[in-house]
Amino acid sequence: MVGKILLILLILLKKKSNRIHSSINFDACRERLIMRIDLHIHTSPRSACSYLDPLELIQEARRLKLDGICLTEHQVLWDIGDVEKLAKDGGVKIFRGNEFTTNQGDILVFGFYKDIKELLMIQELREEVIAAGGFMIAAHPFRGFKTFGIGQLQMTVEQACRRKALEYVDALEIGNGKLSTGENDMARKVAGRLDLPGTGGSDAHRVDEIGKWVTVFEKEIQNERELVQELHAGRFTAVEMS
Ligand SMILES: [Zn+2]
Ligand SMILES: [Zn+2]
């Protein structure tokens, strides 16, 4: 009798471990995920806080074998002609985005080409971006959430889910190269709880910060229109590269 129970337990355990194993089949994942793009980068002089020269950025992105990079300056949109000049030697695709400062924090926006310099109300930005068919990501949504020190007055996942900005975005940045593991983990948990997709980007301001986190897409992306299309389709995964 005891032997029989043990046998049943063993079979159940084996079934469970098989299930866990198949859900993390890395090779299967690798075949599906084909395009590594750093979605969040600041260059100098367009972002005043950045020390990253655009030419240095391209060289480093090629060395890291990134497939694409996104120029997401602070409320400055790159001129398409300048981007084409920068991309002329090939090897890495360059896409334009924008990082807007809103009353509810920083928001990465793709597929929206209006030049706005002033601080925005997130509701207004949302309306304009939806009308343009663009995509909005809450950048580093929980940066500094442990302001009061570990173990004290920490925000719970439930509280974090109630952040206003999350009502107005299509995705959350769950991997930001400038944030601590704890801060990124909180974003990942919140994204899971709210069933929102998660992106990754380095938020690089210096050459050695490029590619720390990337977003890996399942399809080949040739231009900004396709990038926005794949973002809306949710066919991507945030991956830490370090
Ligand atoms: Zn920011
Ligand atoms: Zn940024």
Image (tube, rainbow, N blue to C red):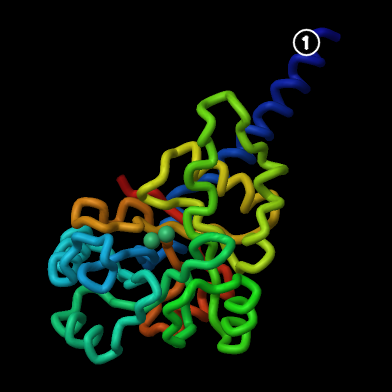
Q: Is residue 91 left or right of residue 224?
A: left
Tell me the residue at 50%/72% (across/down).
Answer: 119
* Quadrant assignment, res 69: bottom left
Tell me the residue at 42%/52% (across/down).
Answer: 176
Amino acid type at circle 1 is Gly
Q: Say whether residue 36 is visible.
A: no
Q: Quadrant of the C terminus?
A: top left
In the depicted view, which residue is nearer to us: 31 or 84?
A: 84
* Quadrant assignment, res 81: bottom left
View extreme (front): residue: 118
Query: Which corner quadrant of the figure contains ligand 1?
Result: bottom left
Q: Which residue is mark 1?
A: 3
In the depicted view, which residue is nearer to us: 36 or 60?
A: 60
Q: Say whether residue 154 is visible.
A: yes
Tell me the residue at 56%/39% (across/down).
Answer: 21
Q: Position of residue 45 (x, y in %)?
A: 21, 71
On screen, residue 10 above or below 26: above
Q: Position of residue 35 (x, y in %)?
A: 37, 67
Q: Is residue 61 left or right of residue 217?
A: left
Q: Is residue 107 left or right of residue 51?
A: right
Q: Position of residue 144 (x, y in %)?
A: 48, 42
Q: Is residue 87 left or right of residue 42?
A: left
Asked which secondary structure carries label 1, the reply is helix
Q: Quadrant of the N terminus?
A: top right
* Quadrant assignment, res 2: top right
In the depicted view, which residue is nearer to us: 42 or 15?
A: 42
